[in-house]
Amino acid sequence: MAVSVGLVTSCGDGDTTPGAQSTMSASVPASAPAPATTAESAPASSSPETSPAATSEDATPPAGSSFPGEDLTPEQAEALQRAVDEGSQPWRLDPSLVAQAFVADRFGWSDTDARAADPHTVEVTNRADGSIVVLQLRRPVRESADGIWVVTDGVRIG
């Protein structure tokens, strides 16, 4: 059974990286994009499951604007954690990869650099136009190294 939660392609199917063609829906997406190429990103793989949404540069908020994160319910976060525990989407354990997947899905950014500013903050730059967002992340289920990361909110700073 596939469980739809924030930036998840499906549970238990063995996916190890976010899908390359995903887009963001207005609520919780059914799939995740591949993080763009950086020194710390994982290889991308294509996923047949995608959700409808805006992926153009037009979806990027104006400078100084804040925007919501994944907005997972506790049940969705638990389901996502179980999926990762079972071997799906291990990239969810790396905040930089989660941040890259988020901006690819939310804004359609495909070529990014991600830099951890602190353990709960990742700055992502869109190489195409120089846009910069700062994302706040947290571990909603476990604070240990095997806890998933989710984006709680963000702000465009440039």
Image (cartoon, grey):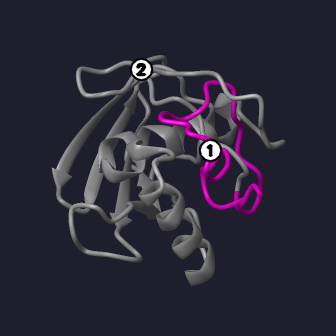
In the rendered picture of this protein, how many numbered marks are placed on residues? Answer: 2
Image quarter of residue 38: top left
Q: Mark 2 — residue?
A: 43
Q: What type is the residue that disc 2 sits on?
A: Pro
Q: Nearer the viewer, residue 96 or 84?
A: 84
Mark 2 neighbour class, 10 Å CA radius: few under 14, some 14 to 19, many 20 or more = few
Q: Amino acid at mark 1?
A: Arg
In the picture, the quarter occupied by the C terminus is: top left
Magenta stretch bounds:
1-28
The dominant secondary structure in magenta is loop
The quadrant holding residue 14 is: top right
In front of the other: 99 or 8: 8
Secondary structure category for the residue under label 2: loop
Rendering coords of residue 117 (x, y %)? 17, 50
In percent of width and height, residue 67 lies at 55, 61
- Occupied quadrant, residue 27: bottom right
Assign a secondary structure to mark 1. helix
Which residue occupies the foreground of this view, 147 or 20? 147
Label drawn at residue 106? 1
Q: Counting residues from the N terminus, which is met first, the one under dot 1 or under dot 2?
A: 2
Q: Quadrant of the N terminus?
A: bottom right
Q: Residue at x 47, y 66 (%)?
A: 81
Identify the residue at horizontal 58%, vertical 69% (top origin).
Answer: 79
Q: Position of residue 95 (x, y in %)?
A: 32, 50
